[in-house]
Amino acid sequence: MRRARTLGIVAALLLSTLLGACTQPLEQDTGASTLEIGATGEPAGLDMITVSGAGTPFVLLYNVYETLVKLDGDGNIRPLLASEWTTSQDNTVYTFTLDHGARFASGTDVTAAAVVASFERSRSDEATDQIRAKWAVVDAIEAIGDDTVEVTLTQASNRWLYEMTGPAGIVADPTGDADLNTSPAGSGPYEFVSWDEGASIELRANDGYWGTPARFDEVTFRYYADPNAMNTAMLAGQLDIISNLTTPQAIEQFADESRFKVYEGTTDGEVVLGFNHRTEALQDLKVGQAINHAIDRQALVDAVWGGKGTLIGSMVPPTDPWYEDLSDTYPYDPDEARRLLAEAGYADGLTLRLRVPNLPYGPPSGRFVAAQLEEVGITVELDELEFPARWLELVFTNHDYDMTVVAHVEPRDLDAFANPDYYWGYDNPRFQRLIAEADAGTWEEQVTKLQEAARILAEDAAADWLFLLPNIVVTTTDISGIQANQISLSFDLTTIAARS
Amino acid sequence: MALRRVGERAAWLLASLLLASLLIFAATNALPGDVAQVMLGTNATPGEAARLRAELGLDQPFLVRYMEWIWGALRFDFGESYITGKPIAPLIASRLAVSAWLILFGMIVAVLIALPAGAYAAVRRRHADGVAVSALSQIGLAVPAFWAGIWLVVIFAVNLQWLPAGGYVTPQESVGQWLAHLVLPVTSLAIVQASIISRYVRGSVIEVLHEDYFRTARAVGWSRTGALMRHGLRNTGISLLTVIGLQLATLLVGAIIIEQVFALPGLGSSLLLAVSQRDLGVVQAIVLLLVWAVLAINFLVDVAYQLIDPRLRRVGDDR
């Protein structure tokens, strides 16, 4: 009997020494010049010209790669690699002058030839359809001397200049003959070091950076498939930043102000209750209006997204220059909804299919919408579809649905409603004309025309904009310079610093 | 002959491996949803999707694709991922390195706990402490591994901050960090496994305590512990081996969830991602590997059975 007990004790001792040996070497990282960022959505590849997905620009845009122009916090376009630019009278010829100091991380100058090579690659067959489409209005790209690039458009396009602030406009180092999909090379304040697939991407400061030097020696983006795992890593002190808290209910975990700072801003992600305009009932304006009146959007945000999120009322986030608050176009009014349904001839009821993706916001929004629509006499057949595969197949491609809920996270995607073949099937020539005129007009015309277009969408009840996804960033109290609003696809490190 | 039986078993193994591969290939191909659509996302036109499908070779007949795939698989060449365009075999090899450590350590720790705990609970089954150990294992059995993992993280990573909450460091980078990152995931897996295994150990030790040979050993002067160590362990070993073999399969499955909880870049997390992206090449390769591993484990348990237990050998000889 004593032997048996000794055996247990020995095993326990063995285990505890093992544990002890493991705990010892774990040192807390105190060096101020490293930054550990928690993120979801790992890239599928590192070349954002040939690989689609938001994960790649999130890490590399503005940090490793730079563009000729960049968006500021007010939605205005500012110089980056180009110190200035001019346009011809009819806005079809852009002449960019490159900054004299601009250098790639390899030490070579950012020349006009390098810009042309990057742009030509970006509009070649090598590029994804998505990237190539941004170049559709471009006729010719030319280097004039060493520091001037001239781009000729087939027609004036405000949209094109805006796209040059994003992935389509990055300038890659032409001297590196390495594969950009495994070793990105640009002119940004950080250099790519390594990608440990499934776990992390590491960047380090580009010591020869031509602009304001990087504030961290090393930056690591760590990827989490499970957002809760990311939250606990933050709580355990393994991370300095949670780049976007995708579970707003978890915000209370970071209430300790002596350790954490929480930023709540806006994103470009409109959560749209989309209507299939090919469905007979939904072609009736009154039915669309009735659905808009039937749903208490504030209550929905409170119920499904922890009360975080902005009511918008149309396809424009507050960070776009043409934003207007349209969230009161069809206020919550179930009686009015019933009246409109009766007028439309559905006094005896109406049955609609609501097919939501199995994303965090999908099923809860779906159940909430279904419950409120039942209140006004619309019977909802609720379906959960696996995202992306099943949702893309049934809803997006086959248009086999009546209503769906999806977050449209692309920036400036108001014009998605201008494509009658898109899955919503919304076909309004007046709206399409306004979008085209806004693109071709002056800056002021763009703003007024897009304002009008957004109003048309709202009044036409082309969809029900449930809410705008919040941008929730959590940092330790040592970190400053976080931009609360997300206005580009990049997690822009250039403003972030460590408090000393 | 024992050898003939092993040969027979091996033939069965080969047949089941082949059948399993066919089933896996058929099942993944029957998955609804299309990788071409997923790759092109919300900007695709039907023409582009069809073009991409042809590019990926998805328009070939089923049997042609299966033959190509299985021929590659036999040479450990699983082609390239649809999504990343990179070869699958090296990806799996690096992911396997993470999962294998997790499962290996999980099982070792589980057995190290279960053997003494089970034996103790058996010997002291009429005493309060023995009953307590037995009850503890009952509780451990009911706890899902991921739940144990979450609690371990809350206690040891968030509150005490002794150990990292998740992530992985390779042993080449730092052995200490590597072990530190494995402690919590291994422990969460081991808690459940140790509970299951200790129940079996307890049961078979109790059986041994009632055996005639045990009573004889005691009668000729062996102490209880001595007799147990000398005669009990071998008999316990047989049933323990079966249980470990069976549990290895559930450990493989448990690891998938544990990898998610602890953000470990193992086979499980890449399998989940690949399924959602319809990256069929990766899905097929990982599932094939898992299924083959389970079949191989069962085969090895069978063979080990023959070697440990002379009674089974005799049955084979009689045939």
Image: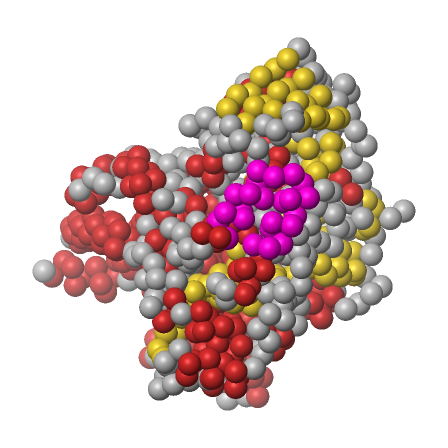
Q: Position of residue B46 (x, y in %)?
A: 32, 45
Q: Nearer the viewer, residue A34 or A459?
A: A459
Q: Nearer the viewer, residue A370 or A153?
A: A153
Residue drawn 58% across the image and 17% down it? A142
Residue drawn 54% across the image and 48% down it? A434
Exactly how many numbered labels are in the figure?
Answer: 0
Residue drawn 75% across the image and 50% down it? A483
In the displayed structure image, the side of residue B8 where residue A455 appears, left or right: right
B125 in relation to A126, above or below:
below
Res A10 seen here: no
Residue drawn 23% across the image and 41% down it? B59
Q: Where is residue A378 in the image (x, y as percent from the top left)?
A: 41, 80
In the displayed structure image, the side of residue B136 where residue A267 appears, left or right: right
For the stretch drawn in magenta, what is the main secondary structure?
helix
Q: Quadrant of residue B308?
A: bottom left
Query: Does A448 appear in magenta?
Result: yes
Q: Where is residue B151 in the image (x, y as percent from the top left)?
A: 62, 70
Q: Position of residue B137 (x, y in %)?
A: 51, 77
Residue sticking out furthest to the right: A500
Q: Which of B42 and B161 is in front in this view?
A: B42
B85 in relation to B189, above or below:
above
Res A154 seen here: yes
Q: Quadrant of residue B239?
A: bottom left
Q: Quadrant of the N terminus of chain A?
A: bottom right
Q: Nearer the viewer, residue B310 or A149?
A: A149
The part of the chain drawn in magenta is A431-453
Query: Does B158 appear in magenta?
Result: no
B24 in relation to A279, above or below:
above
